Image (cartoon, helix red, strand yellow):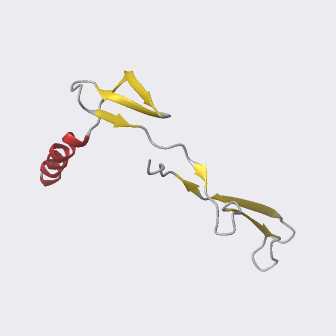
Amino acid sequence: MKWLLGFCWVLMLASPLAAAPDLGHYRDINGVRLYQDHKQGDIWYLTPAIPQLKFTEDQSPAYSFELFRYYGRQATGDKDIFWAHGVLALTVDRQRPAE
């Protein structure tokens, strides 16, 4: 019973935070798309910025590729088993310019 009351409390607190944009009514201003609220015409929602690859201080792209290899061991019972695993990491910037 306590968890149900807690869930209702959280639901009541989170309900004003739910955005409801009208996807049929929007405006493009300087390359930024704004959507109007479906009930209140004076409320507009800003779309997120397009992700862009970030650069380091020396102006090189901020990415890395790590390659891991495993050849197996006799002690673990997987001798002569080979596998490789690669991880690509990208740093993106989602901020809009100040202007």
* 91 shown above or below 69: above
Left or right of 30 in this view: 82: right
| Residue drawn at point x = 48 percent, y = 52 percent | 95
Q: Quadrant of residue 38?
A: top left
How far across and down, in percent of the image, does residue 37 sit? 28, 28
How far across and down, in percent of the image, does residue 22 sit? 33, 24
Left or right of 21 in this view: 95: right
Question: Which residue of the protein is positioned furthest toward the front in this rendering?
Answer: 99
In the image, 87 versus 20, the foreground residue is 20
In the image, 5 versus 88, the foreground residue is 88
| Residue drawn at point x = 25 percent, y = 32 percent | 43
Left or right of 91 in this view: 76: right
| Residue drawn at point x = 23 percent, y = 29 percent | 42
| Residue drawn at point x = 56 percent, y = 47 percent | 51
How far across and down, in percent of the image, does residue 76 sit? 75, 76
In the image, 77 versus 47, the foreground residue is 47
Question: Which residue of the protein is positioned furthest toward the right in this rendering?
Answer: 80
